[in-house]
Amino acid sequence: MCFSWCSLSVSMAVIVPTKNKKDVYKYLFRQGCLVVKKESAHKHPEIAGVPNLHVRMLMKSLCSRELVREQFNWQYFYYFLTDEGVEYLRAFLHLDPDVCPDTHKQKAINRPDRRSRGPRERGSRGPRREWGNKMSE
């Protein structure tokens, strides 16, 4: 326990079980990002059986070592894995070097080639009219 004489705040250490730590780190590595609600009384909705407080404390620790980037908005913490964080979690979780998070993978975009569609057809919009001239029916 740490007592502050200037203010009457008391800070206590939170001991996070190894199972919860591994579950959070696995989820973070798989997704590449993590969202945590500010209130710490509930369980995390996406990581089964892990309290929000444990997730926040683990992310706070990773953030202080600059392994994740933190963004706070509307009572939610958003954490994004950095390149150093990917390397750290790979070593911690004993993963192969070729495994990477979903947010670091390049997605193949299947767009049809514009040249293969042929020339555009004009005139499908109807006749043009001049500005100021009303078309009479």
Image: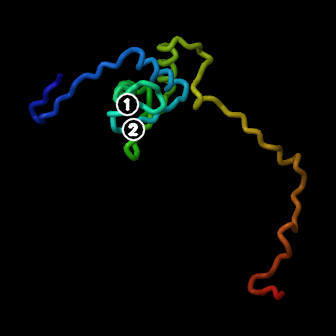
Q: Earlier in the sequence, mark 2 or mark 1?
A: 2
Up/down of 57 relative to 128, above or below: above
Name which residue type carries label 2: Lys
User: Which residue is denoted by mark 2 in the rendering?
Assistant: 37
Quadrant where the C terminus is found in the figure = bottom right
Name which residue type carries label 1: Asn
Query: Distance of mark 2 from mark 1, alpha carbons?
Result: 7 Å
Left or right: residue 53 versus residue 10 is right
Quadrant where the N terminus is found in the figure = top left
User: Which residue is denoted by mark 1 in the rendering?
Assistant: 52
In percent of width and height, residue 54 lies at: 36, 25
Label annotation for residue 5: none
In the foreground, 116 or 94: 94
Residue at the image point whose x is 35% and y is 38% from the top: 38
Up/down of 124 relative to 80, above or below: below
Q: Quadrant of residue 103?
A: top right
Whether pointer 2 and pointer 1 mark residues with C-beta atoms closer than 8 Å, the reply is yes
